Amino acid sequence: MSWVPLSLTSAAVIGLVHIVDKTVIHRYAHSQLTLPLLIGMAQTTVGLLVLFGVLFISRLPNTPLSMVGSALVSGVLFGLSGILAIRVLYSREVSRTVPVAQSAPIFAALLEILSLGNHITPLQWVGMITTASGSGLISLQYKPGRLALDLDKSFYALMLSAALSGAGNVVGKVAITRMPLLFTHGLRMFALGITFLIFTGRKDAWIDVKTYFVQRSPALFFVGINEFITANLGLILLLSALNTGPASLVTALSGTRALFVVAYSTGLGTIWKGALGEDTSPTAVMVKVVSTGLIVAGITAIAI
């Protein structure tokens, strides 16, 4: 399979991860920390399994401690980014949360200028402006019949989340150039999981999780499939695309996950009213599609 269908399939699969996250929050979570706590438990396990697998199959890679530190820092940054995004997702539509959180390439490009001395082309500047415009448009407070002129407060939390994610990409890029892929991935997932556990391990969240196990809640099934299978499948497909195609174009196509999220959430919200708490009125859907299209176009321009 060529890199184009691999990239698009990866975007479609990862888009499902966000939909399942919102389903768990909307239907089962009593605390905004419950899902992050479950994710922390799952990703810490995944990180340890990957690291033990690497050590079992081969010896410990001979790499500088600074590179190990870079991978761990990258995981922490992604963890903080994820916590902020899920916090917003708890009270906001998934179709308005994911596209803004995907504006990370803006911050990654700016950070690369400061840290690596990279040059940003005019097309990339246009891409940044386009992405920021789409993020602002989709974050406008919507009232029936009109759009408010002020941005929703969650916009700022999502932009901080995107900035942390962009920083995680830059730091992670440093580590991946000097260490094996799986070893780096294991370190990042372990650090991400621990970060989630530290910031979300509160009493009410633990009680929620304990109740899930006692009552054998479907939430455990959804989170388990999401974190151990769906998310990793999406990542494997993305890595396969990167292995066979140009990184810039693969990154651009992977940005279409925002469009998949809008399509999934709108479809589910139309078929099952109130399924995800989505506003499926014609005006709201139009705003989401146009603004998400701007974000994806901007990401594409930045990546090329």
Image: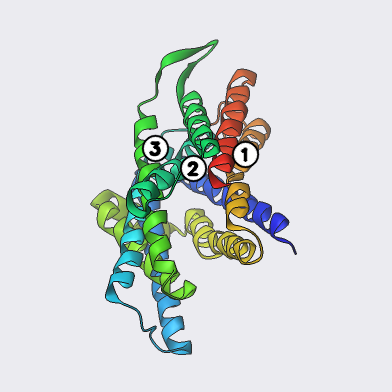
Quarter location, residue 56: bottom left
Does residue 81 appear to the left or right of 300 in the view shown?
A: left
Residue that mark 2 sits on: 102
Residue that mark 1 sits on: 259
Asked if residue 246 can be seen in this view, the reply is: yes
Asked if residue 211 can be seen in this view, the reply is: no
Instruction: Tell me the quarter of the image containing the N terminus.
Output: bottom right
Camera-side residue of 190 and 68: 68
Residue kind at label 1, given as amino acid type:
Leu
* Mark-to-mark CA distance, 3 and 1: 17 Å
Classify mark 2: helix, strand or loop.
loop
Q: Residue furthest top?
A: 145
Q: Position of residue 205 (x, y in %)?
A: 31, 51
Q: Position of residue 108 (x, y in %)?
A: 42, 47
Mark 3 is surrounded, within 10 Å at the Cα level, by few (under 14), some (14 to 19) or many (20 or more) other residues, namely many
Does residue 137 appear to the left or right of 204 in the view shown?
A: right
Q: Position of residue 7 (x, y in %)?
A: 65, 55
Residue shown at 33% from the left, 70% from the top: 67
Q: Please tell me the numbered disc located at residue 158.
A: 3
Quarter location, residue 173: bottom left
Camera-side residue of 185 and 243: 243
Residue shown at 63% from the left, 23% from the top: 286
Residue kind at label 2, given as amino acid type:
Gln
Residue kind at label 3, given as amino acid type:
Leu
Mark 1 is surrounded, within 10 Å at the Cα level, by few (under 14), some (14 to 19) or many (20 or more) other residues, namely many
Quarter location, residue 279: top right
